[in-house]
Amino acid sequence: MNATGPDDANAHTPDDTNAAGSEDAVPTAVWTSRGPADTFEAGRRVGERLAGGEVLLLSGTLGAGKTVFTKGLAAGLGLDPAEVSSPSFTLVNRHGEGRLVLYHLDLYRLAEGPTAAHAVELDELLADERAVIVIEWAERMGRYPLPPTAWRVHIEGDGEDPRRISVTRAAASGR
């Protein structure tokens, strides 16, 4: 897996200059994933840096690797990644056995707009400062207001092609 920070296209690790526990705890980076193991590893690296209160907005096509990334993130939080599955039908899965609580949301089946956030009671979840919230298909929320600790994780690519995983601040990426 190759990763680059925003200023060094030849780097092999993400920009990890952010201090854990701060608003900037999430490493901003671009990774090239050559398979599920790389996608999992990118998620794990992010998960290890989380301190609670972060919201990760995942986007990408069906099968891009959003749930695999979330499994890696769960491993980084000290959770069992085998327990993580896509909450397509339950909408919200709670995992509370790690160093932080993980709420894994999937908005794929919901109508676009703020009602998607209300359907999963996002406001209540955001009140839990000891939690990390991962939202698959987050673009379905439209312009729903999010805290400054929101990050965008975009996974490009499908099929057998390598994936490009970018992690940026949600505010910096137009949200």
Image (spheres, rainbow, N blue to C red):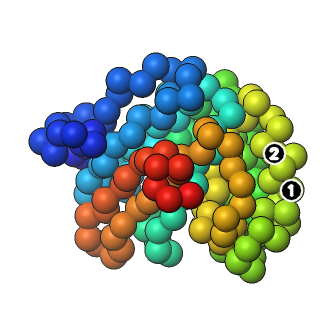
Q: Is residue 129 left or right of residue 68?
A: right
Q: Position of residue 57 (x, y in %)?
A: 58, 55
Q: Name the residue under label 1.
A: 121
Q: Position of residue 134 (x, y in %)?
A: 63, 50
Q: Where is residue 141 in the image (x, y as percent from the top left)?
A: 69, 67
Label 1 residue SS: loop
Tag 1: amino acid: Glu
The residue drawn where x is 47% and y is 68% is 60
The residue drawn where x is 29% and y is 54% is 33
Q: Tell which of 9 and 2 is nearer to you.
A: 9
Q: Tell which of 83 and 102 is nearer to you.
A: 102
Residue 83, visible in the rendered structure = no
Disc on res. 125? 2
Query: Do callouts 2 and 1 mark residues in contact (Cβ within 8 Å)?
Result: yes
The residue drawn where x is 51% and y is 64% is 59
Give me the C-alpha separation between circle 2 and circle 1: 7 Å
Q: In this view, does 64 lie to the left or right of 104?
A: left
